[in-house]
Amino acid sequence: MPEQQPALADLSGTGLRVAIIGAGMGGLSLALALRERGMAARVFEQASELTEIGAAIALSANSIREFARLGLADDLARMSTIPTELIYRHWRDGSRIAAHPVRNDDWYVQRFGAPYFGIHRADVQKILSAALGAEHLHLGCRLVNIIEQADSVVLEFANGRVEHADLVVGADGVRSTVRRWVTGADDAIYSGTSAFRGIVPAENLPSLPDPQAIQFWMGPDAHLLHYAIGPDGEAVNFFAVVATPRIWMDEGSVVGVADEVPVASFRGWHPAVTEMIKAASSPIRWGLFTVRPLLRWYRGRVVILGDAAHGMLPHHGQGANTTIEDAFALAALLAEAKPDDLEPAFDRFQKMRRARTRKIQRSSWVTSSLLHLPDGPAVRARDEKVTRVPEDFAWIHQYDVQQALRAAGAAPAAAAARA
Amino acid sequence: MPQDTVLADLTRVLADVPGVDPADVTPEARLGHDLGIDSLTLVEVVVAAEDRFGLLIADDDWSRFVTIGDVIAYLERAGMIAPA
């Protein structure tokens, strides 16, 4: 749309004050995506440093292709492991129910045009924040209040800081404070499942077959997912999910448990599973929350993205990836917005993103039950289903934000300059 | 909004779904068997319907829809529409 080109230049030149709440995947990606579109933003993060011990993520082609255009794919690759295969196993005997190549035969890159990375979450934050520049990042700023004024928004932080912004983006996760202001309610829903997680040196896992693969061990009312991370696949990140407790009583999403609880939850499972959980020795239970589907992702000058807008169960490994998609889509649409009339851009954003994220959110929910079937007749159909995973879920990985922008009538990003 | 207007609006929503022939959209038509809408495509229909009718359709609700008539009945129950 050539007539929208001047608007892009206008917005970048207006000095529109953009405040992003949260320096996770969504906040950092958005700041970088806005810069690509000629706009500056400040990122406010409640944590005093960007580290989260014991947490890793998988980045798939749908987000890697955006980072590749910004020239960040090599930095990410250096800190990542690409899984050899995607393998589904029986919880007790460890038999391979289905296996699909990922790095093997270069299958994934050939199919989706970008790689699949297992990586420390903190490493991604380091790479993105270094690319952004520390001066744009404001740590130790926990948002406590949003006050709407006629022509701006006032943000109040717990440390006493007060900031004025023309546009606020809530990228503050599944328990989002900004969402509470946008919808007027706490729309987080406890899923009835919780997880134990950890990162273990691969050398401490002698019973583990295929330590460099991404593997689902599926059993009654529980499953364990793991994949290798880091530059040489030297560590294995796992996520062990149980269908308890039925009700989440705690205010926060993390609670301490007795030392023996994680491994006791997997009594009778294959030694590779129990050995991995024992090796982690972090007796913490993470409640798995989703966000109730929302009709509107914005209010006034404030919009939410990522987990804040559509928090989902992690069983497709798409929480971070859809958040990154959101960030690049929103940046493109804001670049075409009128500074004094932001709602049409917010509306285009949610029109472009609501159906896709709702589909993945729903599919992750259904997958959760499939991963937790008791041994019995339903298992056979499920085991048949997991043999078709790469094709059944290709639509998730092949999604291209820039193509989707074009389809929505917005200008895609310029192709990366070749070095 | 009388029922035939809801049906017309719903037909417009479904006209954007690849493979659905608006002529097949009747209250008796089954979403899966007659209209060929699989569960993922149904999510797109639900989101488009939400935008059109301005209400949220909870996952627990839409996953029980079998026919177009079920969708219309739901919209009526939601208080959006005066029954014809």
Image (cartoon, coloured by chain):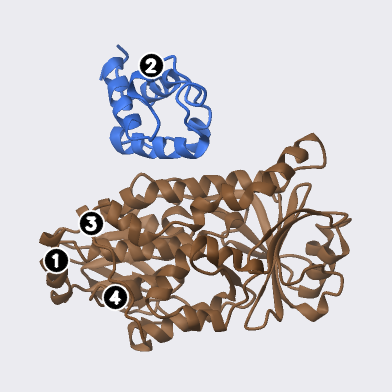
Chain colours: A brown, B blue
| SS for callout 3 | helix
CA neighbours of label 1 inside 10 A, class few (<14), some (14 to 19), many (20+):
few
* Subunit under mark 3: A
Residue B67 locus on image (x, y percent):
47, 20
How far, Cα to Cα, is label 2 from label 1? 44 Å
How far, Cα to Cα, is label 4 from label 2? 48 Å
How far, Cα to Cα, is label 3 from label 1? 15 Å
Say which quadrant the C terminus of chain A sits in: bottom left
* Subunit under mark 4: A
Tell me the tag on residue B26.
Answer: 2
Side (left or right) of A379 relative to A9: right
**Which amino acid lies under the numbered mark 4 shown in the image of this protein?**
Glu
**Which amino acid lies under the numbered mark 1 shown in the image of this protein?**
Gln
How far, Cα to Cα, is label 4 from label 1? 15 Å
Q: Which residue is mark 3?
A: A345
| SS for callout 1 | helix
Side (left or right) of B51 relative to A280: left
Asked whether the residues under marks 3 and 4 belong to the same chain, the reply is yes
**Which amino acid lies under the numbered mark 2 shown in the image of this protein?**
Thr
Q: Is residue B60 above or below residue A177?
A: above
Q: Residue at x 32, y 35 (%)?
A: B16
* Subunit under mark 2: B
CA neighbours of label 4 inside 10 A, class few (<14), some (14 to 19), many (20+):
some
Q: Are marks 2 and 1 in contact (CB under 8 Å)?
A: no
Q: Which residue is mark 1?
A: A5
* Furthest residue in direction top, as rendered: B84
